[in-house]
């Protein structure tokens, strides 16, 4: 099957993608999961090879595509269309935008598709309550409404703020939010994703903003290490360099962004 997740709410879209991967790995095996960055020159070829070959110890496969719309749309369509109704092979695509004409089938059955719009109003309030429950903290109605307004359209920021609030008290009221002097901060997770952008200028701008808001370099590095799979080998080498005293984390991050 082919699963297409799309829309500007990167947080909820990413969470849904992780749910699919986790469910597949639990029911099947992580050995059957392959991640492919189609912005890379060999991305399409590696994807095609993965889909064509049968794993030795696993009958099912899950191909997770990154930067799918950076690839030649016609070539990508030719590769994945045969798997639209496949029983044991799944192609998972997550993108912020709707597909171009050559990939319009992603928004039609038998493909499975789900849109993730930015939340506002009552939907954002409900989402704040859901995030709070998951983090083990209760929000009163006024606190949930205030957080939803401050982080309107920024689910990453809302999730990060609620995780921080969970460390202060088991229940948060609007009065306590005033005490914490909560203000809207730059959208944190979009900045993290910006460090991975294809354009050097945007990578540098995102990293500079993260440094300016005082985010610790080790924290940025470790988050990127978990998210930036196509640079796993590079990050491991930089991590060794830091731990051996050859680099500081901020120097490693700058070198990573420049490379």
Image (cartoon, grey):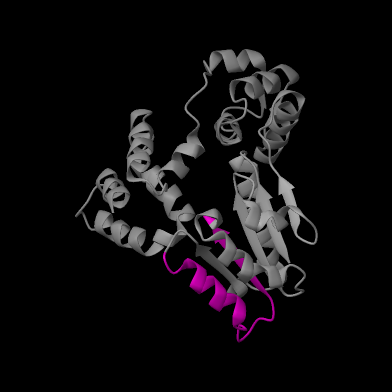
Determine if residue 19 is in view. no
What's the residue at 25%, 58% (across, down)? Answer: 241
Would residue 259 appear left or right of 114 to someone viewing this image? Answer: left
What's the residue at 40%, 49% (across, down)? Answer: 198
Q: Position of residue 135 (x, y in %)?
A: 65, 38
Relative to residue 123, is residue 233 depicted above or below?
below
What's the residue at 75%, 60% (across, down)? Answer: 111
Would residue 242 appear left or right of 189 to someone viewing this image? Answer: left
Q: Position of residue 193 (x, y in %)?
A: 47, 44
Give the quadrant of residue 138: top right
Q: Quadrant of the N terminus?
A: bottom right
Count every numbered label the image shows and give the total. Answer: 0
- What is the residue that sits farthest to the right in this orientation? 109
Give the quadrant of residue 132: top right
Relative to residue 87, is residue 143 depicted above or below?
above
> Which stretch is magenta?
41-67
Q: Is residue 39 magenta?
A: no
Give the quadrant of residue 206: top left
- What is the residue that sits farthest to the bottom in this orientation? 56
Closer to us: 161 or 54: 54
Closer to us: 30 or 101: 101
Closer to us: 155 or 94: 94
């Amino acid at each position: 099957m082919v699963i297409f997740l799309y829309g500007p709410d990167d947080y909820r879209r990413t969470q849904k993608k992780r749910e699919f991967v986790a469910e597949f790995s639990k029911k099947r095996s992580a050995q059957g999961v392959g991640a492919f960055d189609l912005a890379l020159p060999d991305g399409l070829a590696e994807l095609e090879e993965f889909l064509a070959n049968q794993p030795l110890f696993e009958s099912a496969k899950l191909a997770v595509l990154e930067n799918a719309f950076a690839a030649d749309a016609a070539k990508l369509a030719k590769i994945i269309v045969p798997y639209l109704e496949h029983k044991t092979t799944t192609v998972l695509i997550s993108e912020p935008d709707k597909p171009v004409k050559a990939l319009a089938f992603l928004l039609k059955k038998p493909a499975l598709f789900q849109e993730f719009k930015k939340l506002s109003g009552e939907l954002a309030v409900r989402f704040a309550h859901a995030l709070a429950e998951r983090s083990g903290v209760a929000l009163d109605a006024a606190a949930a409404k205030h957080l939803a307004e401050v982080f309107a359209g920024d689910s990453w920021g809302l999730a990060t703020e609620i995780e921080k609030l969970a460390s202060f008290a088991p229940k948060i009221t609007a009065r306590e939010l005033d005490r914490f002097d909560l203000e809207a901060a730059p959208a944190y997770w979009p900045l993290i994703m910006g460090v991975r952008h294809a354009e050097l200028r945007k990578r540098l701008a995102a990293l500079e903003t993260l440094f300016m808001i005082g985010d610790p370099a080790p924290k940025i590095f470790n988050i990127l290490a978990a998210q930036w799979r196509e640079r796993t080998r590079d990050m491991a080498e930089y991590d060794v360099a830091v731990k051996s005293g050859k680099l500081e984390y901020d120097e490693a991050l700058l070198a990573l962004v420049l490379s």
